[in-house]
Amino acid sequence: MSQTHRAVAIDGPAASGKSTVAKRLAESLGLVMVNSGAMYRAVTWQVLQEGIDPKNTAAVLEAMSRMRIDCDVKNSLSTISINDRLLTTEIRSAGVNEHVSKVASIPEVRDSLVTMQRDYLGEYDVVMEGRDIGSVVFPDTPFKLYISASEEVRAARRAKEGETDAVAKRDAEDSKRKASPLKVAEGSIVIDSSDLTIEDTVDAAREALIKLGWED
Ligand code: DC
C-alpha cells in the first residue's frame, strides 16, 4: 500500500447502504469515492453487449482481453469507460444484476480489476466500497468498515430504487465463491444499518473510523 495515501475500505452485501455511506464519507473527509462494483458491472455489461454467455469463462476472458478499460475520477467519484464509452446507468440494468456475480467469480477478472482499484491509491486518498476491499484490495489499511442490513430491508431498498435485483441470490453467490468471497475482513468494525437512517449510519461510520485511528 502507498505510504502517502490513505484508504477507507467499506464492504458489505448488496443494498446494505455502503455506497451512500461511502459517498457521504468521501464528501466530509475530502476523499475520492471509488465504487468497485461498477467495475465488475462494466465488464459484465460489455460481455452481454457482445452477446457472450457470462458462464463461458474462456469467452469472457477473451472479450476482456479486447476491452480498453479506463478508470478515472470526476467530481471526486470514480468513473469507468470501456472502449471510450462512459458507463453510468446502463450498468444497473436487470441483466447486469443477474449476471455480475458470475463474472465477478472469475479469478482473472478479479486480478485485473483489483490492480486498477489499487492504482487509485497511487494518486488519491480514497474510500472504496465493495466486497473484498478490506480483505484483499487494501488488507493493510486500518480503516475497515463492514455495513450490513437484514435481507428484507435490503430487498425493500432496491425495490424502492426501482431496480430488479435478487439481492439474496447475489449475496449467496458473492459469499460462496472461491475467489475473494464477501466476508467481514479482519479488523473491520461492523455496522448494522437495518434500523438506522442514512444520517445515523454515516455518523456511526464516522465514529468507527475515529475509533480505528482516523485523524483529519
Ligand atoms: O456493489 P455492487 O452491488 O454494485 O456490485 C456488483 C457485483 O460486483 C456484486 O454482486 C459482486 C461484485 N463485486 C465484487 O465481487 N467485488 C467487489 N469488490 C465489488 C463488487
Image (cartoon, grey):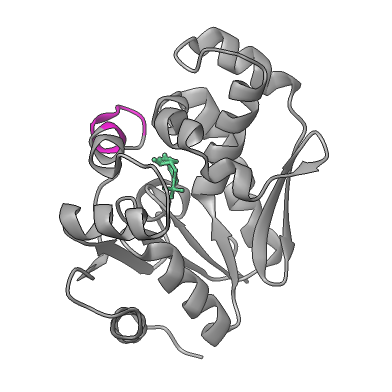
Visible residue check, residue 1: no
Q: Is residue 64 left or right of residue 99?
A: right
Q: Can you say which quadrant of the picture contains the N terminus? A: bottom right
Q: Residue at x 47, y 26 (%)?
A: 103
Q: Position of residue 96 (x, y in %)?
A: 50, 34
Residue 165's place in the image compared with 47, above or below, is below
Visible residue check, residue 183: yes
Q: Residue at x 40, y 54 (%)?
A: 139
Q: Is residue 21 left or right of residue 110?
A: left
Query: Does the magenta-highlighted stretch encompass residue 175?
Result: yes
Residue 1's place in the image compared with 108, above or below, is below
Q: Position of residue 11 (x, y in %)?
A: 35, 57
Q: Position of residue 21 (x, y in %)?
A: 41, 72
Query: Does the magenta-highlighted stretch encompass residue 203?
Result: no
Q: Residue at x 31, y 60 (%)?
A: 157
Q: Is residue 51 left or right of residue 200?
A: right
Q: Position of residue 117 (x, y in %)?
A: 58, 49
The foreground one among 190 and 215 is 190
In magenta, the rendered stretch is 173-179
The foreground one among 186 and 206 is 206
Quadrant for ligand 1? top left
Quadrant location of residue 195? bottom left
